[in-house]
Amino acid sequence: MTSSEIPSVPIEAVPAEFDTAAPAGSGTAATPPARLLLDVREDDEWQLGHAPGAVHIPMNDVPARLGELDAGTEIYVVCRQGGRSLQIVRYLTHFGFDAVDVLGGMVAWQGAGRPLTGAGDHAAKVY
Ligand SMILES: O=S(=O)([O-])[S-]
């Protein structure tokens, strides 16, 4: 699979439901979500700023945490600018997951004016 064959979407096509935090209890093992925004950046990047409705699994942890993902869920994968997410989409599709790469990553998310949330008392930001 070449990068041109990797399923991908521009930031405008990422569902608005990820602009808000998922309600408590959604996406349990019993009822996996229809769609998921998976942020594969490192912990420090996540804490500085992330999409309110995203789920965080750092890239290197994805293989060990595949059991947290459901094959019936459409998984939008995001990183900083698209390098890591491309690799993870390739990996997930290889294992039968319905994964798409978010072009431009969180830099594009921020540039499009989509909401960010972070940890601590600083303004959330993607660097
Ligand atoms: O997040 S990145 O791999 O595009 S720098």
Image (spheres, rainbow, N blue to C red):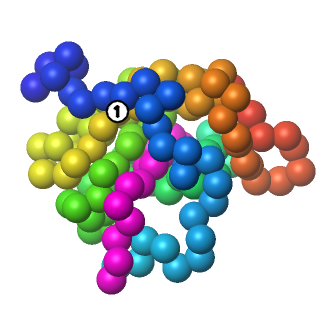
| Lateral position of residue 5 relative to residue 123, left or right | left
Residue farthest along the bottom direction in this orientation: 30
Q: Name the spot of residue 13 as percent of width and height, x first.
A: 44, 32
Judge by depth and name the residue closer to the eye, 47 or 103: 103
Whether residue 43 is visible to the viewer of this picture, yes or no, is no
Graded by Cα atoms within 10 Å as few (under 14), some (14 to 19) or many (20 or more), the crowding at tag 1 reads: many
| Lateral position of residue 48 relative to residue 50, left or right | right
Q: Name the spot of residue 123 as percent of width and height, x first.
A: 85, 40
Location of the N terminus by quadrant is top left
Residue at left 35%, top 61%?
Answer: 34
Q: Which residue is mark 1?
A: 101
**Residue 33 magenta-highlighted:** yes
**Residue 34 magenta-highlighted:** yes
Q: Relative to 11, is 27 above or below?
A: below
The segment highlighted magenta reads: 30-43
Q: Relative to 65, is 112 above or below?
A: above
Residue type, numbered disc 1? Asp
Residue at left 72%, top 48%?
Answer: 117
Judge by depth and name the residue closer to the eye, 90 or 71: 71
Residue at left 22%, top 48%?
Answer: 98
Judge by depth and name the residue closer to the eye, 75 or 126: 75
As helix, strand or loop, the secondary structure at mark 1 comes to strand
Quadrant for residue 8, please give it: top left
Residue farthest along the right direction in this orientation: 121
Q: Relative to 67, is 75 above or below?
A: above
Location of the C terminus by quadrant is top right
